[in-house]
Image: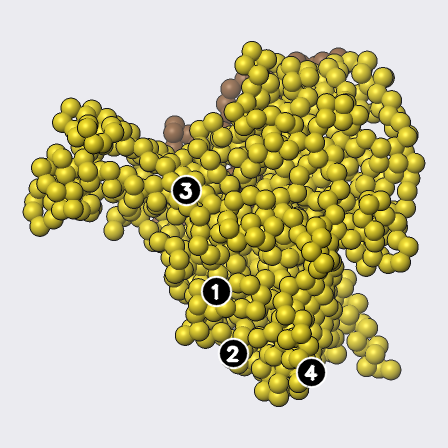
Chain colours: A yellow, B brown
Amino acid sequence: MVDNGIGASVRRKEDLRFLTGKGRYTDDINRPRQTYAYILRSPHAHARIASIDTSAARNAPGVVAVYTGQDMAADSVGSIPCGWQIHNKDGSPMKEPFHPAMVTDRARYVGDQVAVVIAETLDQAKDAAELIEVDYQELPAVVSTPRATAEGAPLVHDDAPGNVCYDWELGDKAAVEEAFGKAHHITRIDLVNNRLIPNAMEPRAYIGEYDDSTDQYTLYTTSQNPHVIRLLMGAFVLNIPEHKLRVVAPDVGGGFGSKIYHYAEEAIVTWAAKKVNRPIKWTAERSEAFMSDAHGRDHVSHAELAMDENGKFLGLRVHTLANMGAYLSTFATSVPTYLSATLLAGVYTTPAIYSEVKAIFTNTVPVDAYRGAGRPETTYLLERLVDKAALEMNIDRVEIRRRNFIQPDQFPYQTPVALQYDSGDYEATLKEALQRADWDGFEARRAEAKQRGKLRGIGISTYLEACGIAPSNVAGALGARAGLYEAAQVRVEPTGSVTVYTGTHSHGQGHETTFCQLISEKLGVTHENINIVHGDTDKVLFGMGTYGSRSLAVGGEAIMKAVDKVIDKGKKIAAHLLEAAESDIEFKDGNFVVTGTDKSKSFGEVALTAYVPHNYPLETLEPGLIESAYYDPKNFTFPGGCHICEVEIDPDTGVTDVVNFVAVDDVGRVINPMIVEGQIHGGVAQGIGQALLEGCVYDEQTGQLLTGSYVDYNMPRANNMPDFQVDHHVTLCTHNSMGVKGCGEVGAIGSPPAVINAVLDALRPLGVEDISMPATPNKVWAAIQAARTARAA
Amino acid sequence: MSSITVSMTVNGKPVSAAVEPRTLLVQFLRENLGLTGTHVGCDTSQCGACVVHVDGKSMKSCTMLAAQAEGASVTTIEGLASNGNLHPMQEAFRNNHGLQCGFCTPGMVMSAVDLLNQNPDPDDHQIREWLEGNICRCTGYHNIVKSIKEAATTMRGGS
C-alpha cells in the first residue's frame, strides 16, 4: 500500500483554495455583458392571476427585459419534469400536473415564480419589480396533508381529486393481517416527521448564457448533477439538444439533496439569455431560498407492530401521508415509496410488512429528497415504535432489538419489502456503541443529574439504510425515468500524470482527495500528479451526479473499472517492451513486472510509450492511454449501525442539552477515515437539528411561510452540538470491488430517533409519553407541565 | 442614483471606488474589488459567511455600508495568509478537516482569528459560544472547534 492510499486520513486537496478565498462558486463568476435577474414571486399561497401589468417595470432605469409565464408559454416551454413515476394500487399512473417555470394563471404556493426582471444591475431589477402590477384573486389554501385530504378541502390542482397524487402500496397485506390475527400484543404509534428546509450555506445561483454565433447555451449552476440538469432542462423544458447545451457546476457550497433538482430559475435564465442575447445571473437571497428550495420530510404516519409473547416481531403495517407540495419536484415521488417503505424491515426479521402511502398536493413549496431521503422517516418510525413496544411488553429496549436482529449468518437477507441486504453485523455495532456510551453506567449519571435538578435520559437507535443508488434495471422497474449508473474517464498523460473525469459531483464531500487515494493506491501515482475533474458536461463524458451516498460506491467503482482498463492496456504495452507474454506481466507498486523476474517497466515509461509509439504493437493496439468506464451497481449498498444519545433537560426551561452522542456505523470499507468521520458529524448534526431545533412552519389558514429566515428557522449552532464520538465497524459490501457502502447520509438517518428516545427517557418518570420533533424548549416545557397537571388531577 | 466615493485599505492596499450610497461592504469587496472569498449566505446578518476584519475586529460585511468603512483597514480571507504561508488558523482548519463545502469557511476562519485575538486560550464552551454568529451546515462544528483549539495552541507557541 502507498502512504496516501486507501485507509489513510489524507488532508484534503481542495482545502487550500477554500481556505484562501479562492474557491470558485457560481456567484463568484461574472461573464462579459452580464445582466441580473430578479424573480417576482407570489405573496399568496393560492391565487388566480387575473392580469399582470409589466409596462412600468419595462420602462424603469436599467431594465433590459421583463418576462412572465405567458412569454414562456408562447415559446412552448415545457413542464419541469418529475423523474420517477409511481403507480396507484389499481395500476393507474400518478397525477402529474403541469409544472410551469413561471405561472400563467394561478399561483400555488408562496414563492411561486410570477415574473422575471432582467436589468443592468440587481438593484435596478429589484426596483423595477416593485412596479409590476399583479391582479391576484386569492383562493383558499391547504398546507398540511391531514387537512388537504379532508372532505371538501380546496383543490391545489383541479385534476387531482382529494389532492391525491398517488395512493400506493407495498407488501403482502393478507400475510400482515394473518400476523396481526395471531399477535400476542400490538403496539401502535402516530408520528409526524417534521418538514425541514435544507439550507445549504451557499444559496442557489445560476448564470444563463447564449452564443448566437454558434447557437450554444451555457448554464452555470449550483447543482449536484450537471448532466442530469442538461438532460432534464434540455430535453423536457427548453427543447435544447445536449450538444448545444453546456452545464457547469463549479464549486458548490453544500447540497444535502436540495441541489439535485432541476429548478425553474435554471430554465428561466437559460431561456431568457437567448431572448436578451446577454448572460443573465440570478442568485437566491436566503429568504428566497426558504420559499423556493425544495423542502424535506413532511410525513404523517400511523404504524402498528404485531408481536408474539416474547416480543418477536410478527408483522408491521404503516399508513403514511406524504406532502409533495404544490408540484412534483424531480425525485419527490420516490422518497416516501421506494426510498422509504422498502426500508421498513430495518435491521429486524419482521416476516410480514405492508405499507400504504398517499402522496398529497398542498399549497407549499415542493418537497423532495433531503439528506437521507425517506430513510430517516422510516428509521424514526421504526425506532420510536420499537422503543414503545419494549415499554409495553416490559422488555428491555436493547434486548427487544437483539431478539429481532437479522443475524450475520442470515446474509444475503431477503426482506418482505423488495430489498435484499448483502452484509451487516448489527450486534457488533450495537455492542461497540453500548460500550462507548457506557450504557450500563447510565443510571448513576441519571441519579447524579437529578441531584442538580436536571432530567437525564439516554436513547438508542439501531438502523440500516439503502444507498449507493442504484441498479438501473431495478430502479427502472420501480418507475425511475433514468439510469443510475456512473461514468468515469481516466486519462494517463504522456508523462505519467493522471486526470480523472468523474460524473459524480463534490460539494463538500472531498472527492478530489478520496478519488486521488483510489488512483494512488492502484497506480502508485502521487497525489500531486493526479487531478480530479468534475462538474462540467463539456469535460466529463457523462454522469448521474452525487446524491444517495453513491459517489464512492457507484462513481468510485466506475473510476476503478477505468483504472483496470488502463492497467490491462499497460500490460499489453509492457509485454511488448519487455518481449514477454502479456499473461506473464503483473502490475505492482507502480511497475509492470515480468512475473518471477527483475525485468520491469515503470508506469511512466509505459505511459510515454503509449503516446510516443515508436516501439509499439501498432498493428494490434491503438496508441494513447485513456480509458472510460460505466458502472451500474448490482444492488443497493446497506450501511447500518447504532446511535446512542444522552441528553439533559432543564425542567424549568424545557431546554434539552445533548451531552453525549455516540455513532458506531458500518459504512463498508473506509477510504479516508477523516473525511468519513466528518460526513458522520455533519449528518448527526442535521439529525439533532431535526430532532430538537428545526421545523418548517406554515400558517394553516393563509399558507404563509412563518419560518422564512434564520431568525425564525432554528439552524443548529455550535453551542447546540456536543463533541461526537464516532467509530466504525466494517463489514464489506459483497457486490462491489472495494467493499464500500456509503457514509453521506447515515448520520442524518440514524440519529433523530436516538435523540427523541433519549428525551422521552428523561421525561418518562414525570409521566410524559410522547413528544414530537422538533422537541423545542417550549414543547418540552409544555409536556412537563401537562404531565404534572395530569398527575395532580 | 448618485454615487459616492469610498476609500479604504483592503489587505494592505489602498483602494477607492465610486459606488451607490446603498452599497454594502460585502458588495464592494466582491463586486468592485473582485474579492469573492467573502461570501453572502443570508440576508438577516446571521450566518457569518461574510465576516471580515475591520480595523482588526471581526465584522459581518453584509451588515455595514461600504461608506461606513471609509478610511478603515479591512482584511479579508484573501489577505490572511502572508508571504505564501497559511495563517495558523487556516493551517489548523486544514489539519483537522474543519471545512467541507468551504462556503462558510472564510467567515468562520476570520471570526475564529478574532476570537483568539481576544482570548488566546478559549475552552470548548467559549469557542462554541463565540461561534453563535457563524453557521456551518456541513461539519456539525466538531472539527471546527478542534481546529480553533489547535490554532490557539500553535499561536501561543505551544506544540
As helix, strand or loop, the secondary structure at mark 2 comes to helix
User: Label 1, label 3: how many angstroms apart (C-alpha)?
Assistant: 24 Å
Kindly identify which chain the residue marked by label 3 belongs to: A
Kindly identify which chain the residue marked by label 4 belongs to: A
User: Label 2, label 3: how many angstroms apart (C-alpha)?
Assistant: 40 Å
Residue under label 2, please give it.
A402
The amino acid at mark 4 is Gly
Q: Earlier in the sequence, mark 2 or mark 1?
A: 2
User: Label 4, label 3: how many angstroms apart (C-alpha)?
Assistant: 49 Å
- In percent of the image, x 90 and y 46: which residue is there? A140
Q: Earlier in the sequence, mark 2 or mark 3?
A: 2
Q: Is residue A128 above or below residue A518?
A: above
Q: Is residue A202 visible?
A: yes
The amino acid at mark 3 is Tyr
Left or right, A503 with reference to A584: right
The answer to whether tags 4 and 1 share a subunit is yes
Q: Who is closer to the viewer here, A64 or A469?
A: A469
Kindly identify which chain the residue marked by label 1 belongs to: A
Residue under label 4, please give it.
A181
Q: Is residue B129 visible?
A: no
Q: Earlier in the sequence, mark 4 or mark 1?
A: 4
As helix, strand or loop, the secondary structure at mark 1 comes to strand
The answer to whether tags 1 and 3 share a subunit is yes
Residue A720 in percent (x, y) is at 62, 56
- In percent of the image, x 91 and y 39: which residue is there? A138
Residue under label 3, please give it.
A630
- Estimate how packed mark 2 is, as few (under 14), some (14 to 19) or many (20 or more) residues with alpha carbons within 10 Å: some
Residue under label 1, please give it.
A421
User: Label 2, label 1: how many angstroms apart (C-alpha)?
Assistant: 18 Å
